[in-house]
Amino acid sequence: MGGSYKLIIFDLDGTVSDSFSGILHCFKRMLEHYNVDYPGDDEMGAYLHGSVHDHIRKLLNTDDKGVSDALEIYRDYYISEGEAMCKPFDGAEDVFRELKKAGYLLGVATMKIHNYAVMQLENWGFLDYFDTVHGADPNGMMDKSDLIQMCLKDINVEPEDALMIGDSVDDLLNARKASVPFLAASYGSNLSPSICEDNGIDYVRSIRDVVTFIVG
């Protein structure tokens, strides 16, 4: 069971939504546009978390202008093809409803570009559950710890009174950077139950288990 929190901050991709196939599809389509070989899903798994800008820079070995151009292509594929491949995990809305009923404030901190994060939450009917939402800026100038801190500031909550829920090492490290307790979504891609147990990280096996961990 978790501690006494006021604000619960969710990562989006891999924590609220099963979005990996859609993200990988968009990377593949972007690489096809540049006639660059797709390295395969296993290797591309490392590109599911963190800054899209940094990932594109590495994949294409390009400069800032090249990143900007490639990002537009990636976004076009995401809007036209990838978004429809992303679905919320079963039970996500029930979790949000139960946490709000129990009196918790809810937030989202995601490296998905802010406008697309808001659009996705709105399309799924989830946006009204959240008291604060912060996604990545289009220029890639912020990391996730910045977004977490922006959520805290919006609600005027101290770091120790919040909980960050995410499925990646990047989420874990940025929660620690922001001095916010962390809960691993082990049903995502990057923090399996065995990894969490070996490293003393609190975790849940499904999004439905979040309510039990927090509320009891």
Image (spheres, grey):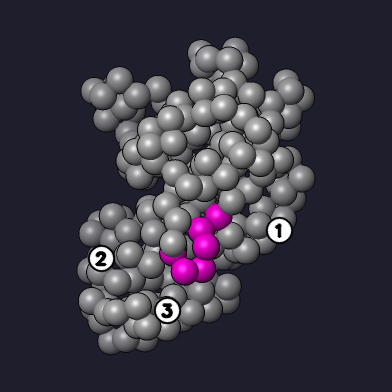
Q: Quadrant of residue 182?
A: top left
The residue under label 3 is 68
Q: Along the line of sight, which residue is nearer the eye, 170 or 29? A: 170
Whole-percent x and y of residue 121? 66, 53
| Three-letter amino acid code at the position of disc 1 | Asn
| Three-letter amino acid code at the position of disc 2 | Gly
The residue under label 1 is 123
Q: Which residues are magenta?
A: 135-140
Q: Residue at x 72, y 55 (%)?
A: 122
Q: Which mark is residue 81?
A: none
Which numbered disc, 3 or 2, marks the residue that appears first in the sequence?
2
Horizontal side of 55 relative to 6 (left or right) equals left
Q: Tag 3: Cα neighbours inside 10 Å, few (<14), some, or many (≥20)?
A: some
| Three-letter amino acid code at the position of disc 3 | Ser
Whole-percent x and y of residue 118? 65, 57
Cα distance between the residues tagged 2 and 1? 30 Å
Placement of 100 over or under 141, stated as above or below: above
Q: Tag 1: Cα neighbours inside 10 Å, few (<14), some, or many (≥20)?
A: few
Which numbered disc, 3 or 1, marks the residue that appears first in the sequence?
3
Residue 164 part of the magenta-drawn span:
no
The residue under label 2 is 40
